[in-house]
Amino acid sequence: MRSRFDGTVGVANAILPAVVKLKRFVVDRIVEPAIPLRRLEAYVVFWARMVYRLRKPFIVGVTGSVGKSTTIAMIATALSHPRLRARVGRVGQTRDNMNDDIGAAATLLRYERFFILPWSYPRRVATLLTMPFRALRVALSRYPDVMVMEFGVGATSHFRRLVRIAPPSVAIVTCIGPAHLELFGNVDDIAREKGELVKAVPPGGLVALGNDHDRVAMLQAMACAPVVTVSGKGLELSRRLTHVVCRHMGLEEAAVDEALASFASPKGRLNLVRLRCITLLDDSYNANPLSMALGLDTLAQSAAAGQRRVAILGYMAELGDDAVRYHDEVGLHARGCSDLLVGVGPDARRYRPDRWFATSAECAAAIDGILRHGDCVLVKGSFSAQMEKVVWSVKSFGERGASDAKRAA
C-alpha cells in the first residue's frame, strides 16, 4: 500500500524538471539578455566617469613592463607626506592590482579591494541598484584631489578605453619589454598599446619615460605633452620618476626626499627582508624577462661578501612563441648572478637549475634542504607560479634563527 509520502515524492519528482526548465528560461532568456556582464561593466564605467566629471582629480597614470606598482606606491607615499599633502590635497591610488578597464573604474569609485563583476544574477541586480548610490556617496565625500593610477595590459584591459575612463594629466612609462606576448605579437605592439597613455596627456601635462629600453623614441613621437626621460633601474628609477612628478607639481625636492626616507616597497615587489639567519628578496608577485634580470641584478648587489646567493625562480607566463628563448636567456643571466639556482615549474627547466621542482608547493616543502644560515635569497616568478608559497617557507626557515639553521660549510 502506497503512503501519502510516496505520493508527495512522486509529485515532486514530476514537478522538479519543469521548475528547472522554468529557471533556465528565466535566466537564459530574460535575466542574461537584460544584464549581461558587458552591459554591467559599461554601467559601472558610466558611474565612474560620472564621479570623475564631478570631482576632476589630477590623474597620474603609470604603466610599463616592470616597476609600475613600486612607482605608484612611491609617488603616492611622497604626495601623502604631511608637508606635501598640505599643497596637493588628498591622495588616492590603485589598490590590489586593479589596473584593467573595470579596475580603473573601481579605483575612481574608491574600491579598496579587488573588484570583479558578479556572476550570480541576484548580485548583478544588486550592483545595478546600489551603484548610483555608491557613486553619489563617493562624489560627495572627501574625494582625492590626486589619483595615482596603474594602467595595465591584459585581456580585460584596453588603453584607449582606460584613458577615457581616467584621463591622465601626467603619464609615466617605466620601461617597455617582453611581457604579455601571448596577447600581442611583439614588443612594438606592446609599446604602441601603452603609448595610448602617452598620447592622452594634454599639452599642459607631462610625460616621463624611463630611458633604459629601445622604445623611448617611439613613445616620444606619440606625445603631445612635454617629455622628460629618466635614467635608472628598479627603486632608483622609481625614485627619480617620483621627483620628476613632484617637480612638475611645484613641490620641494627636500620634502620629497624626507617623504621617501622610510619608503617600503609593496608586498612581493623586491622587498628586502632581513630575517634572523638569512636575507630575503621577495619579488614573488610576478615576472617577465626584464623584471627577472632586475631581480637577479639586485640579488648580486644585495649579497654581502661571503653570502651565498640563492635564486629561486618560477617560470614566466604569457611569453608566447618566444618563451623557450626568454627562459634560456634568464637562466644564463641567473647563473652569473647566483651561486645556487632553483627552478620551479615546467618552463623553469630551461634555466638549467641546480635543483628543479614541478610546483611551488614542492619547493616550499623542500626549503630546509636548500637553504643555509647566512644565505641571500631571491624568490621570483609569474603570478600563476604561486611563488608566495616559497616565500612563506623561506620566512619560516629564516625566523628559526641560527640555532636551527644549517651553517654554511
Image: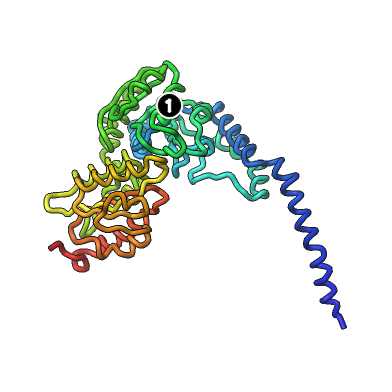
Residue at the spot of label 1: 192
Q: Position of residue 77 (x, y in %)?
A: 35, 37
Q: Position of residue 45 (x, y in %)?
A: 58, 34
> Residue 171: percent from the left, percent from the top?
40, 26
- Residue occupying image coordinates x 40% and y 18%: 225
- Which residue occupies the extreme bottom position in the image? 1
Residue 277 lies in what quarter of the image? bottom left
**Residue occupying image coordinates x 84% and y 68%:** 11
| Amino acid at circle 1 | Arg
Q: In the image, 333: left or right of 265?
A: left
Q: Secondary structure at mark 1?
A: helix
Q: Residue at x 51, y 42 (%)?
A: 111
Rendered position, 289 above or below 11? above
Q: Is residue 116 visible?
A: yes
Left or right, 334 with respect to 267, comes to left
Residue 386 image offset from top left, x and y in percent: 39, 53
Asked if 267 appears above or below 165 in the picture, the reply is below
Within-10-Å neighbours for mark 1: few <14, some 14–19, many 20+:
some
Q: Quadrant of the C terminus?
A: bottom left
**In the rendered image of this protein, does residue 350 appear above or below residue 135?**
below
Q: In which quadrant of the rendered image does the N terminus lie? A: bottom right
Q: Is residue 81 visible?
A: no
Task: Please name whichever residue, 251 or 309, is drawn nearer the observer in this view of the structure.
Answer: 309
| Residue at x-position 81% and y-position 63% | 15
